[in-house]
Amino acid sequence: MRRHLLSNAQTRIKASLLPSALVVTTLLFSSPARAQTAIADIPLDPNKQSVASQWISEALLAVSTPTGSALGPTGASRAYGMLGTAMYDAWSAYELLPSSTVLGDTLQQLDSDNTSSNKAEAVSYAAFTVLSDLFPEPTLVDSFRNRMTALGFDPDHAHTTSANIGQTMANALLDFRHNDGSNQLGDNPNSNGNPYSGTSGYVATNSANNLPNSITSLERWTPENVPIDSPPGDPNHQRIQSALTPHWGNITPFSLSSGGQFRPSAPEAFLLDPNATADLAAGTITRSDNTTVEISKDLIGVDINPAFIAQAEEVVEYSASLSSPEADSLPGGQAEGDRRKLIAEFWEDPSGTPFPPGTWMFFGQKVAEKDNPDLDNDIPLFFNLGNAVFDAGIATWEAKYYYDYVRPVRAIRELGRLCLIGTENANGDCEIRAWAGPGQGTQTILATDFLTYQTPGGDPSPPFPEYTSGHSAFSAAAAEVLRQYTGSDDFILGDGTLGLGVTFGPGDSRFEPGLTPQSDITLSWSTFSEAADEAGLSRLYGGIHFDDGDINGRILGRQVGNEVFARTQYYLNGAQSVPEPGVTTALLALGGSFVIRRWGRRKS
């Protein structure tokens, strides 16, 4: 069984001690087989959640459904940002300094109306209105209605001033966001008419059909077959990937001046000379002087960029390290290989989960979880977190489709076909040492057969370009606002304990059930940065990203987190300028509660 850990001392909490929390978590995030998300392994006590946190749970549930999964990580991050903003806007009407993001102080209430019950009601009507718009499927709306009823509110009528404030704030935000470029309503004439469908006219350079001749650029992303070795006509073929939200970098951010504000430098090119061209089908390179040479390893460092080859070799080495005998040479041996596998699984967050941004919203719930939940603390927390992952998604997708960069699985397979990676065998094919599939361990395989360590039979890589890593940026942005908001990088839970983690028992793996791990493996984090860095590194263990995609994604995420935190402070301080970052950091060093006191509740 998997066990939740509450502290660095790795104190284990048995399931029998937390039945209600585990029941709720299982209902939200379980699958027909094994749990598919980190959140399913860590209990959340429903009795220790503020109204705001309860609505976050509704959003996480909605995103985890088949309807919500269609949003992908981009649409999910926008939903979390909109929910956090709507709840904040409703709450701000009762506070002394905070100003609404959409209506300013036009709905400001009297001091005597600043009560916990009024704020909870306004926040709930705002959340209900926004979520019902984002997730209009009847079964999901019924869930939102049930939450309203459980909280003591009428989902059909806004009888009170507080209810009207919540609805008004939410509708103003929806009016704005319906025209933010996301194409939520599918009404953009440049789209196919489906909600969130692309509006940029993006067409992939490469195609998964008729491989290998359809690969015209080794640097560009390829929509893969799912499963990867099941082309159309194969009985196991499910689909060919479609590019997810290629227009996302152009939508209106919360805090950024544009999606490209922090665009990183370009990833590694295949050829050293930008004026040279490669004909992959013919296996030749035409130099800028119009001479043509056959592609071979002899050209690495002459015409072919050695850094492009090296980054692919690094991913192969990570793959080989997952199992024996290569894992035996790691510190800790096969246990370290198992740990790497579980890190890749734990952070995968595929369809059917709240996606990577949702994991961090859940981490925010754990930070806020306490015996006497405080709405006045939680609203700014989720305002920051939701918009951190929202803007991180925009900035990351801008870079992804600007560079349209190749995923490791396609790069490694094509480099193998060209014999630019691995060792040539007697048949003239190039072989590598890598993980060979579930239960197969590390073997010598053809480089053209390289597999990612992801959900077996699923997408070999996510359906969008590689550079930069969404996991890295979502996680770094969220960790940054959590660090600045709390005043410390320490992952301190709502009850004051330090650290969060989960233990996997023998055979608990989803990808290799019954086989991995061979003994208990614990993943734990004592700081937000540790968790964020592990999330980024998980994509290298899984064969999903190159190192540059991870590292530059982390940098991008931290930059976004800083911008978001500065912007939330602007609104929390009445839409006025806030001190320079150095001053803010010094003030935060006095204690995370200082931030709350700056906009403290009015005295009635």
Image (cartoon, grey):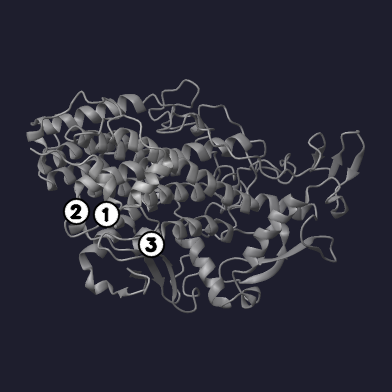
Kindly indicate whether the residue at mark 2 contacts the one at mark 3 (C-beta within 8 angstroms).
no
Instruction: Name the residue carrying label 3.
Output: 35
Instruction: Name the residue carrying label 2.
Output: 373
Residue 267 percent coordinates (x, y): 66, 43
Asked whether 12 or 214 is in front, the reply is: 12
Q: Is residue 502 left or right of residue 593?
A: right
For marks 1 and 2, the one nearer the N-term is 1
Q: Is residue 495 left or right of residue 189?
A: left
Disc 1 versus disc 3: nearer the observer? 1
Residue type, mark 3 in image: Ala
Q: Is residue 318 left or right of residue 196?
A: right
Quarter the C terminus occupies: top left
Query: Looking at the image, can residue 72 be seen?
Result: no
Mark 1 surroundings within 10 Å by alpha-carbon count, few (fewer than 14), some (14 through 19), many (20 or more): many
Q: Gap between marks 1 and 2, in whole Å?
A: 7 Å
For marks 1 and 3, the one nearer the N-term is 3
Q: Disc 1 on helix, strand or loop? A: helix
Residue type, mark 1 in image: Ala
Residue 41 percent coordinates (x, y): 35, 64
Kindly indicate whether the residue at mark 2 contacts the one at mark 1 (C-beta within 8 angstroms).
yes
Residue 576 percent coordinates (x, y): 32, 29
Residue type, mark 2 in image: Pro
